[in-house]
Image: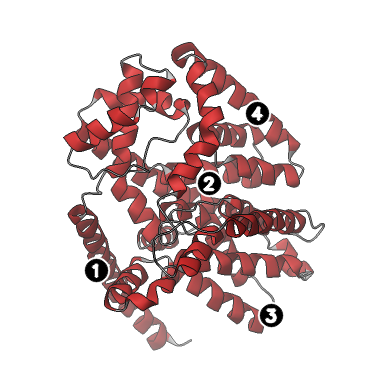
Amino acid sequence: MDVHGRTGRYAIRPFVIAMALIVIGICVVKEWQGLGRLHFLGYDYAFFYNAFLHVLSGQTDWRHLYDPAAERAFLMAHGYPIDPHNHYVYPPQFAWMFAWLGLFPFGVSLALWRLLSIAAGMFGVYWTMKTLWPWIRRGHLFLAVAATLTLTPFQLDFAVGNVNTILFALLALAFYAIYRLDRPALGAIALAAAVLIKVTPLAILLALAIQRRWNVVARSFLFLSLGLASSFLFLGWESTAAYATHFLQFGRQSMANGPAPYNQSLLGVLELLWNKGRAGSPPLWLSLLFDIYAVAMLFVIGSMMRRTPWTSESIRIGLSALLPVAVSPLVEQPHMVLTLPALMASLHLIRRHPRMSARRTYAALLATAYGLQTLPVTFLVNRATRLLPSLYWIHIQMFVSFAFMLAVLLTMARERPSQTFRKAAIG
């Protein structure tokens, strides 16, 4: 036994971990300093908090809850920049569920929200790992959380105070309950709560329907109906009905903020390349092309999730997590936190792949997908485009990351794995 070699590895491990933590700390501080200079720290949460105050004061009708003038007044009072395309676009139920945070002063409430988001992120990583690996070491969990903290989408979500990390935790809990614990009711409660917060998780229910997990889908709609009925006792039904009728209009207003790097969907990438980084309205054919792409993605991902008997649960988890990002015309960078289950599911599958050559190729793609989401790459891209504006097209790194993860999962889904690989699909 090579005692000296093993001793050397153990001796260098604390040094490597310490250096990694230092790099993470420097990157996080620089990210928050940059957002602070732009007055964006807590920016998104200001819209949420304003909605919470309306609910607490009983102003739950559409005219008050979604009043742009009240939003602008609140932003100006707290020193935030004004953008006519930004507004509160979440269901009334979200403001109802978290209205208790409006009982605190804005600064205290924002701090509580960030603590809640950080805890949600840690639990989300834990639940995702427990879904894929029944036994996990504390060191591996620590490394997974540290790696997650290097990701730009998570840091942006924490900094601006958005809700995507909480959504990630709810989806991770749903996957854990459905695929590991076999508790469809718990998974349905988590999914219903996510849909009440934001409409996007409905795509996960579609993914589960494609997999014929009707027990989860039916329970999810039952709990969603109960949640809506409960909210109507406090909110009334008018604001929810008005929200449903204005939903598409909200989407169009949000997309008016422009292409990548703001919008990292295929549509945002195409707009960036078409306008060569300049402001301007995209032609209609780009939207039509994206619609065709979204339908094709739904068909391809759905087909791969239904391949039996060899499609593993890990592939289904990864593809389910990617579906909301794949078909959405608006993918802001914080939305990419929802792709973390796909990233971890891909890692789980690669480590168990029986062929070394394929494992190396998949590992290279996955490492690139992870790297493109990290803070150092974000800093590098921003720095490069400031020095050379002609490099505007490199602001598509989040979409490329998504495409690489999707390529890995779809390619592995097409393979007919060996019996050993199939048995190790989860666990």
The CA distance from mark 4 to mark 2 is 19 Å
Q: Nearer the viewer, mark 4 or mark 1?
A: 4
> Which residue occupies the foreground of this view, 371 or 334?
334
Question: Which marked residue is nearer to the observer: mark 3 or mark 4?
Answer: 4
Mark 4: which amino acid? Phe
Eye-nearest disc, 4 or 2: 4
Marks 3 and 1, how far apart at CA: 36 Å
Residue wearing tag 2: 172
Mark earlier in primary sequence (3, 1): 1
Residue at point 42%, 73% (across, down): 394
* Side (left or right) of 204 relative to 338: right
Farthest residue, direction top: 233
Residue at the location (66% across, 59% down)? 293
Which label's residue is closer to the chain start, 1 or 2? 1
Name above or below for residue 280 compared with residue 2.
above
- Residue that label 4 marks: 221
Instruction: Give the x, y percent position of residue 96.
Output: 41, 23
Q: Which residue is mark 3?
A: 355
In this view, the residue in front, 148 or 287, is 287
- Label 4 element class: helix
Color style of the picture:
secondary structure
276 sits left or right of 110 in the view: right
Q: Are marks 1 and 2 in contact (CB under 8 Å)?
A: no
Q: Which percent across, then down, holds residue 392?
A: 39, 72
Q: What residue would you read off at disc 1?
A: 22
